[in-house]
Amino acid sequence: MPRLNIIILEQTAPSVYRYALWAAVPAARQPFYAIDQAAFVSQWKDALAGDTTNFRNGSVTEKVASIQVPTGTTVPQIKAFLQACWTDWQAEVTARNDWPYYSTTWDGTTWAAGGVA
């Protein structure tokens, strides 16, 4: 599990905020995330060594994005929006499986099933 879920990084314009979302990766898919993040460094400068280890071993992944909110949006509204973004993204990371047939092979005669749950 990630230590944190949402980090507001900066306000880049009067109503634009950049943020990071951290999501837990299902165990069977962590090796694939680890490959993608072998030299990963979080966009949040205050990430701890343990956070970086989790990114690099694939148990946690980070998404950085920006939102532009209408003038007059309150801080509680921004927080609620970011919570909804995190909930949606965690659900996507949990459900997405790009490797359902990974290592499925054919030796010229027989297919051997592979796949990652």
Image (cartoon, rainbow, N blue to C red):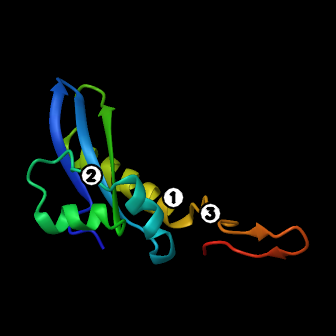
Q: Nearer the viewer, residue 69 or 30?
A: 30
The residue under label 1 is which amino acid type? Glu
Frontmost residue, 3 versus 97: 97
Q: Residues within 10 Å of mark 3 (few under 14, many from 20)?
A: some
Q: Is 74 placed left or right of 32 in the picture?
A: left
> 112 or 70, which lies in front?
112
Say which of marks 3 and 1 sits in front: 3
Residue 73 seen in render: no
Residue 40's disc is: 2
Checking the image for residue 99, the label placed there is 3
Kind of residue at badge 3: Trp
Label 3 to label 2: alpha-carbon separation: 22 Å
Q: Secondary structure at mark 3?
A: loop
**First in sequence: mark 3 vs mark 2:** 2
Using the image, determine if residue 112 lies above or below residue 53.
Answer: below
Counting from the top left corner in percent of width and height, residue 100 is at 67, 66
Q: Give whichever of discs 3 and 1 has the lower sequence position.
A: 1
Task: Tell which circle, 1 or 2, labels the residue nearer the N-terminal end.
Answer: 2
Q: Residue furthest left?
A: 46
Q: Is residue 16 left or right of residue 100?
A: left
Q: CA distance from mark 3 to mark 1?
A: 15 Å
The residue identified by callout 1 is 92
Q: Secondary structure at mark 2?
A: loop
- Give the percent coordinates (x, y) of residue 42: 21, 50
Q: Is residue 109 above or below residue 64?
A: below
| Left or right of 111 in this view: 57 | left
**Could you tell me how far apart the alpha carbons at marks 1 and 2 are, in whole angstroms?**
21 Å
Which residue corresponds to the image point at 25% horizontal and 50% vertical from the top-left?
79
Q: Residue at x 12, y 64 (%)?
A: 49
